[in-house]
Every structure is written in C-alpha cells, then in structure tokens.
Image (spheres, grey):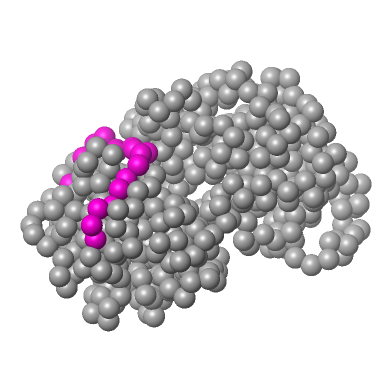
C-alpha cells in the first residue's frame, strides 16, 4: 500500500511504478484505490470479461495503473469515484455508475455504504490476483476523518486480514518540511497499523541526496522506520497529472502554440499529456493568457453552464472571436463542443440548475440537450472528409472514449459532420466557410493516438509503454531490487 503524507506527494506515480515493476517480475498484480476524487476518468468494463461487458468509469490513475500491471482496467480497480461539481458537492460514482441517492446524502452518512461497495471490490480483486498495489488518498493521518476513512485505514485493515500488508509512506521533499510530514503522519497513524509501515520514500528531490544526512538517520531513530529511497524530480515521466493543470508550460518540439481554457470545473485534462509533449502547450485562466496562441482548446467540463458563464466573465468569449478573426483555430472537446453551439438546454438539471434553452458561444449551429443516463462509451472513431485547416485529420481512425450527458445535433446548415462513432453516429462537426477553423468533437482521447498526433504536428512522443517501463526502472534504481522484492514477499 502507498500512503501519502499529503495530496500530491506522489502516491499515484509510485503505485503505477510498483505495478509495472511487479508485473515485470512475473507477479499477477492489480491496482486498487477504494475511493478517488477526480474529474479525470476513463471508460472501462464493469467486469473484466471482455468487450461485451457493461461499461462504467473509474479514475484515470487506476486506469493507467492497471495497464502498468498488464491487466484489463475495470471498475473494481476504483469502485468509488467522486467527481466534484462545485466546492460542496460531488457526483458519486459507485462501481462505474452514478448513484443519485448517494449523491444527495451528506458525506459522513454515505460513507458506510461506500465502504461496503469498496470492500466488495477489494475482496474480488484479492481473490483473483496474487498481489494488489493499493493507493491511499490524501493522507492516512486525517484524524478528524478517521472513523470514516475506509480509503486509507479501512483498506489497510482489509489487506491485513487477508494475510499480509506492507505500506510505504511517501512525501514531497520539493515543497519543504518533508521530515516533519513523515514524522507527523507516523505519529498520528493508528497503533494497530504502525507495524505495517515498511518504510518512507522521499519524492521529487532535486540536488545531491547526500545533503539529506543526517535527517534520514535521525528520523529512523525517532520512528524505527527506515528511509527506503529518494526519487528524483521527474517532470517528464510521460504520464498524465492525477489532477489539476500542469505546473508549468511544457516545451514541446513543435512550434505550435496551444492554449487550453482552464475553467473551474475542467475534466479529463489528463488527455492533454501527449499534446504537452508535442507542442508548446499552456493552460489559460484569463483572456491575456490566450494571446499569441495558434490553437485555443475548450476542454471537457463537469458543469458546462457554470464554466461557460466563467468564460464570459473573463472576456474569453470575445478573445475566441478575435482569435478566429486572426486566423487561429478553435477546438472544442465534449463540454467544450457543447459550448461552441448556439443552444444548451437542461430541462432536468443534469448539468447543474435546470434551465430551458440558453445561448452558447454561437460558433457552430448546434444544440445540446442534457438527459440521463450518462453516455459511457469506449470504441473506435473515424474522421471523414475535413476542410482546411483540419485536413490532416481526414480519414483518420483511432480509439477514443465518451463520458457525457448531453446529446448534441446540428439544427441548421453551417456545420459539417466529420467525426463518427463505430455505429455511424455523428459525434463531431466542423464549421463551414468562414467558420472552418472551428472543430468540435464529443469524444476524449484523440491526442493519445500516436499516428494522429504525428499527422497534426509531425512529432513523435514517447509511447505509454515506454513511460511505464521508465517508471519501473526508476524505482528499481532508486529503491533497489532487493528492497522491492522484500516488499512484495508478504
């Protein structure tokens, strides 16, 4: 199990690396995280029984961890997913499906039901696999939440009852105070779980690790827990960020400058990691940050109406039109596509407060109406004929995924259907004439296709498989094969 001294300490990255390292040793390994809070999600089978299984959604981190473990991602790997819609409310996804009743309950009241669902998934995985790599959430030392903390403390006890648990505690040394974080977390852990703590890990270190002495020795003298390794700062590890925007613009090899609107309820920003490796990509929170871009991308949104209002408050809608007048491109993805249209209709309140038709940005003659249930789909898509400046996408086919409630259609001339799912349904449109630089697609994941990325930018980036192997090499070198073998020998 990988615990963190804080959010952002590196739990997801370390768990992913451990999954691939264990798989390389021939172990039958799978990831597990009882509960994740993220708007970065992937569509996966409900059961690992093949392509005909029903579909659900899990956090992106567990999706990539499953691929690292060389197993098919499925909902048991992340049985509870909380998708924030505003500061005090989250959509609750249980085993891949939205649970409306639990969404309406206060957090403490619903925790018992969520814990039961999570444990059932844990038990299925534990019975099926030789080893589980478990990721905690936030910190295991949140003493105000301890009675309801099934993600860190509860899961650890389930694993212990199964016959063996080894836990690592990772801290972000780059932020400072890492020794205090480690010692404080150790001091607040429940006594019954202290024997499971096999070691500390410092992550994101820059400089000479010898300068850490005598800190590790003093920490071990106080806690009895050794420092097992120091992982260097990895800005180019090749995997998407767990949450949030990238900390700094990525200097890709292409000269194309891309600005992605980073509105308050963004979702699925993890799909832009390959784009950041191939282009000059930045995330924009203001009108000024859109200046100088060749492309402006409107990404997914967990609340389209709220993010559209925010976009207008920043004056970014006017900046979009000025950008088009200068010959720039605009790409809308999922919620961004819906904003590009003329009308957004939400009579049942599926996206937020219920409302009748409200104006979108008016850049494509499209209407979107929100209705339940959420559309979850992971399948091949294909572009047909596109006009300049998007002609590089003509006839391109790739795998992609959809996570959305809105149904979008063209209500007038002026938008050409250009992207189709495997059933032949139009899920993407390009503007005609003067609006040809505007493209909207309802599907995520296009930039994760290496051939499509090369067609657009002439660049080839590191493959996902290469990135996963690189992470396994990282822990093998900095933690050591002997240490890792001992951890997995429980």
Q: Is residue 433 left or right of residue 97?
A: left
Q: Is residue 56 left or right of residue 163?
A: left
Q: Residue furthest left?
A: 412
Residue nearest the observer in this picture, 319 or 399:
399
- Residue 224 percent coordinates (x, y): 88, 41
Q: Identify the residue shown where x is 15% and y is 59%.
A: 415
**Residue 308 visible, this angle:** no
The verdict on residue 302 being magenta is: no
Q: Quadrant of the N terminus?
A: top right
All told, the count of numbered labels is 0
Looking at the picture, does residue 445 appear above or below residue 109? below
Q: Residue furthest front?
A: 395
Q: Write down the region rendered in magenta.
A: 369-386
- Residue 320 percent coordinates (x, y): 28, 73
- Residue 202 percent coordinates (x, y): 76, 53
Q: Identify the residue shown where x is 61% and y is 31%.
A: 30
**Residue 317 visible, this angle:** yes
Q: Is residue 1 left or right of residue 124?
A: right
The verdict on residue 384 being magenta is: yes
Residue 286 in which image quadrant: bottom left
Helix, strand or loop: magenta stretch: strand
């Amino acid at each position: 199990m990988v615990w963190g001294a804080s959010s952002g300490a590196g739990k997801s990255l370390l768990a992913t690396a451990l999954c691939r390292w264990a798989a390389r040793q021939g172990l039958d390994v799978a990831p597990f995280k009882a509960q994740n809070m993220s708007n970065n999600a992937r569509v996966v089978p409900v059961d690992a029984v093949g392509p005909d299984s029903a579909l659900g959604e899990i956090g992106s981190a567990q999706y990539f961890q499953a691929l690292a473990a060389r197993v098919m991602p499925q909902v048991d790997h992340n049985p509870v997913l909380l998708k924030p819609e505003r500061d005090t409310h989250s959509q609750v996804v249980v085993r891949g499906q939205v649970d409306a009743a639990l969404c309406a309950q206060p957090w403490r009241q619903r925790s018992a039901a969520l814990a039961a669902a999570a444990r059932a998934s844990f038990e299925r995985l534990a019975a099926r696999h030789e080893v589980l790599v478990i990721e905690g959430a936030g910190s295991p030392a949140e003493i105000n939440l301890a009675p309801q903390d099934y993600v860190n403390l509860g899961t650890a006890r389930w694993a212990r009852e199964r016959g063996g648990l080894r836990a690592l505690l990772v801290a972000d040394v780059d932020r400072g105070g890492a020794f205090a974080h480690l010692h404080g977390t150790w001091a607040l852990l429940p006594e019954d779980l202290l024997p499971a703590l096999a070691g500390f890990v410092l992550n994101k270190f820059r400089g000479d690790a010898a300068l850490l002495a005598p800190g590790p020795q003093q920490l071990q003298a106080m806690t009895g827990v050794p420092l097992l390794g120091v992982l260097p700062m990895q800005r180019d590890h090749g995997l998407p960020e767990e949450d949030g925007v990238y900390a700094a613009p990525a200097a890709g090899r292409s000269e194309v400058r891309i600005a992605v609107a980073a509105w308050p309820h963004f979702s699925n920003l993890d799909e832009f990691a390959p784009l950041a490796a191939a282009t000059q990509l930045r995330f924009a929170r203001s009108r000024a940050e859109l200046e100088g871009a060749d492309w402006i991308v409107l990404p997914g949104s967990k609340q389209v109406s709220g993010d559209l209002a925010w976009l207008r408050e920043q004056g970014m809608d006017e900046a979009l039109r000025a950008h088009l007048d200068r010959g720039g491109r605009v790409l809308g993805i999922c919620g961004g596509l819906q904003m590009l249209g003329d009308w957004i209709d939400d009579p049942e309140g599926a996206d937020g407060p219920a409302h009748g038709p409200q104006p979108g940005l008016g850049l494509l003659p499209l209407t979107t109406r929100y209705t339940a249930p959420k559309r979850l789909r992971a399948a091949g898509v294909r572009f047909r004929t596109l006009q300049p400046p998007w002609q590089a996408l003509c006839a391109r086919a790739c795998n992609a995924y959809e996570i959305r409630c809105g149904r979008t259609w063209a209500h007038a001339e002026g938008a050409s259907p250009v992207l189709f799912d495997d059933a032949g349904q139009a899920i993407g449109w390009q503007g005609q004439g003067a609006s040809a630089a505007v493209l909207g697609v309802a599907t995520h994941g296009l930039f994760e296709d290496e051939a499509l990325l090369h067609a657009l930018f002439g660049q080839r980036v590191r493959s996902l498989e290469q990135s996963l192997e690189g992470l396994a090499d990282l822990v093998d070198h900095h933690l050591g094969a002997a240490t890792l073998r001992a951890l997995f020998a429980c």
